[in-house]
Amino acid sequence: MKPIQVGLLGIGTVGSGTFNVLQRNQEEIKRRAGRGIEVTMVAARNLERARSIVGDGVQVVVDARAVIANPEIDIVVELIGGYGIAKELVLEAIAAGKHVVTANKALLAVHGTEIFAAAQTKGVMVAFEAAVAGGIPIIKALREGLTANSIQWIAGIINGTTNFILSEMRDKGLDFATVLQEAQRLGYAEADPTFDIEGVDAAHKVTLMSAIAFGMPVQFDRAHVEGITKLAAQDIKYAEQLGYRIKLLGITRRAKDGIELRVHPSLVPAKRLLANVEGAMNAVVVHGDAVGTTLYYGKGAGSEPTASSVIADLVDITRLHSADAAHRVPYLAFHPNAMSDLVVVPMREVVTSYYLRLRVADEAGVLAQVTGLLATAGISIDAVLQREADEVGGEGSTQTDLIILTHNTREGTLDDAMAQLQSLPTVLAPIVRIRKEELA
């Protein structure tokens, strides 16, 4: 059979990896796909660099629309990123009857509903394994491997930059700003790391996983998003002393009145496998009612790990290229006419447990005052740790840290209690609150 012809929009880190892996493993990929898969056209800003990667046998152009307009191209691979021109090109490729593969989690998390609807109308496929967790086949697992299950919850370390920073802060006892500079020097963090360190990148990814797990439209605008910029070295140290490690988690969970969708730093018990994922690695834990808890671990970024997922999508599309659209795996696992109207639960209604750190005056009665106020609010305390004053401010210090672990409570209830605690004259600094996830 004639090989499937692929056009790449972008030949950067992932694009070059995709081309190289396809070339290197072309015979094995052909045996799996049932026919050859060839990159025959590439759109790139830097023509000279692109030609140095793909050689003379591939047409290289500046205009991405020339790739979409080429009637010989069967699949368009969008590797540009962002919400702007990438959205226009993806929709134009779909309108032209091309299948689309993308690694663009931001685009799909924000505009996925529109893109999937357009693809359904045209009867083409949109595949995005590479958009979440790099080389880990988590989309395939959720969409197909776990299809028998009612998914109960997902929790993932899905941003390598923040996991590297937190690992270094814990290992070396350094503060956030120092480790961020080192991460940028080593290439783990971008020059502008905002999307990573503020949790936005992880929120894009967990939005997509949530939509597939629960059969609901993408709802990034309703996700609760917190990053790691306010984490202090002493909280990482205290967490360790209590038997926990702090990780930036993307979490989505079935709740009584809908679905939780949130990204924030979390205390995870040190005995959990997820707590021991270090450096720039990614891991996702999925809990289904039939299968129980499953773990997916691997490289969440990089040229060839991400290319592995791009090519897996190319193979899937090649296999189903001539299949009736009704017989293909739905974009978000559930058939479009069977999608749920589940709502995303407001953060104030989320129920979980908490770590609180209060910098307080080192005087009699403060602990009783704090715990009494929490008791009045109906918040049950699991553990209390008080640091000696000289550990906090040196010998002769008049301040100390109270560390409190709570049992499960409603976030809104804790918010109100924290406001009262903060108003106490003996509470000397903003209270630190980190959510605690047992993942059991």
Image (cartoon, grey):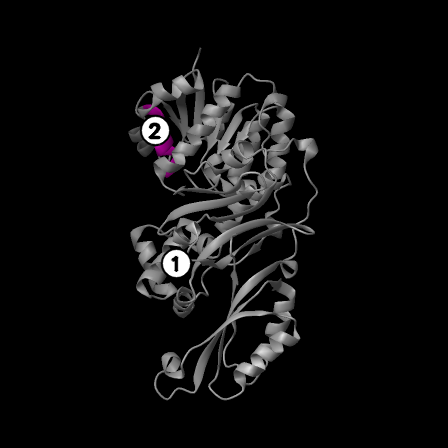
* Residue 321 highlighted magenta (yes or no): no
Decide if residue 426 is on the left or right side of residue 232. right
Would you say residue 150 is visible in this rendering? yes
Camera-side residue of 78 and 410: 410
**In the image, is residue 360 above or below residue 227?**
below
Residue at image mark 2: 21
Residue 432 spot, x, y in % from top left: 50, 70
Magenta stretch mostly in which secondary structure? helix
- In primary-sequence order, the first of circles 1 and 2 is 2
Q: Is there a contact, CB below 8 Å, between mark 1 and mark 2?
A: no
Residue 334 spot, x, y in % from top left: 63, 33
Residue 169 spot, x, y in % from top left: 35, 62
- Identify the magenta region: 12-23
Q: How many marks?
A: 2
Camera-side residue of 287 and 58: 287
- Real-space Cα separation, disc 1 to disc 2, in angstroms: 32 Å
Residue 244: image quadrant is: bottom left
* Residue 15 highlighted magenta (yes or no): yes
Q: Which residue is drawn at 39% across and 33% down?
A: 307
Residue at image mark 1: 166
Q: Is mark 1 on a helix, strand or loop?
A: helix
The amino acid sitting under disc 2 is Val
Decide if residue 98 is on the left or right side of residue 257. left
Decide: few, some or many residues near mark 2? Use Cα within 10 Å; few <14, some 14-19, many ≥20. Answer: some
